[in-house]
Image (cartoon, helix red, strand yellow):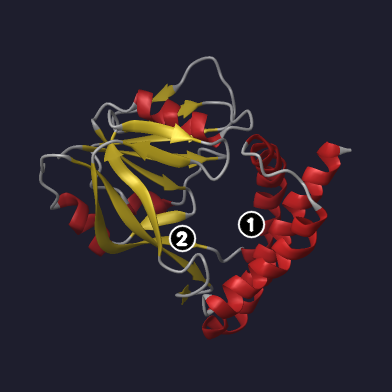
Amino acid sequence: MNITTAIISKTENIDPQVLASIIFSAEIIIIVDSPVKKPKLGQKIKIFYQSLNNNFADQRNFALSMAANNWVLFIDDDEYVSTELAREIQLIKGVNNVTGYLLNRTDVCFHQRLLHGETGHTKILRLANKTAGKFVRPVHEVWKIKGRVEELTSPLYHIKDSLVSEFIGRMSRYSAIDAEELLKENKPFTYWRLLLNPKGKFIQNYFLRHGILDGTIGLFQAYLMSIQSLTVRIFQWTKRN
C-alpha cells in the first residue's frame, strides 16, 4: 500500500530524525504556514505553502487534496514514527470497509515517556483513506471519516523537550481560536467555567488520570493544561466584553 505522509509545520526545516522515521513513505508533503506563489516540488518530498488563517483543519484538508496516494499519514513536525509503527504500517493490507487507523501517540519529555494524564497513550486518527472524509473544527481538529476504523499498537512519539516554550506557543496560537469555537458550540463564557474548569483540568490530569505517577513532569504537565484551560476562558471573557 503506497502512503503519502503529510507534515504540518511552521517552517520547511524538518528535523532529520522526523524525516528518517517516515522514509518508508512513497511521498512526503510538507504544509508550511507561509504563502508563496508556487509550491516547491521535489521527487519525493514536496513543500506547499498554505496560510494557516486560524484554521488547522483547512491546512490538513489542503494536504489531503495534494496527496498523490489514497492513503495519507499525518504527523506534526515534533512527532516521529517509531521503528515498530513503521513496520506495522508497511504490513497493512487492504481490508474491506477499513478506511482508517488510530495511532497510539505517546508524549516524551526529556527522554521520559509520559504514560498518564489526558495525553498518556492518546488514541488519535492519523492514518486513513483520503476519500473517506475530512477534518473539521479550526483548532483541536478531528478527522471525520466513514467506514471501519481499526487501531495500530506501536507508538507515534511526540517530543516535548521544549515543554514550557512549546506550551506558550500553542497557548498563543490556539486559545483565541478555541474560545471562538466554543462559542459556536454553545459553550459561552460563564464565571462558573472560569473558576471550575481550570481546577477541574488539574484534578483530572494529576489525580484522576494518575499524572502523579509521571513524577515532576506529570505535575508540570497537569499545571500547564490547567493554565491553558484558564487562558481559553479569559479569551472568551475578552471577546464577550
Residue at horizontal 78 percent and vertical 58 percent from the top: 192
Query: x, y (%) of residue 138?
Result: 57, 35
Furthest-right residue in this view:
241
Residue at horizontal 82 percent and vertical 55 percent from the top: 191
Query: x, y (%) of residue 185?
Result: 61, 38
Residue position marked by numbered label 2 in the rendering: 158
Residue at horizontal 76 percent and vertical 54 percent from the top: 231
Q: Can the viewer see residue 17? A: no
Few, some or many C-alpha atoms within 10 Å of disc 1 (few <14, some 14-19, many ≥20)? few
Q: In which quadrant is the C terminus drawn?
A: top right
Q: Of the two numbered discs 2 and 1 on the same chain, state the one appearing first in sequence.
A: 2
Give left or right: position of 13 versus 146.
right
Quarter of image, res 180? top right
Is 216 located above or below residue 42 in the figure? below
Three-letter code, disc 1 = Glu
Q: Are marks 2 and 1 in contact (CB under 8 Å)?
A: no
Q: In which quadrant is the N terminus drawn?
A: top left
Residue at horizontal 57 percent and vertical 83 percent from the top: 212
Towards the viewer: 92 or 236: 236
Few, some or many C-alpha atoms within 10 Å of disc 2 (few <14, some 14-19, many ≥20)? some
Is 123 located above or below residue 53 in the figure? below
Q: Can the viewer see residue 58? A: yes
Q: Secondary structure at mark 1?
A: helix
Number of residue marks: 2
Query: x, y (%) of residue 201?
Result: 65, 66
Three-letter code, disc 2 = His
Query: x, y (%) of residue 169?
Result: 68, 51
Give left or right: position of 3 versus 31.
left
Residue position marked by numbered label 1 in the rendering: 166
Give left or right: position of 32 versus 166.
left
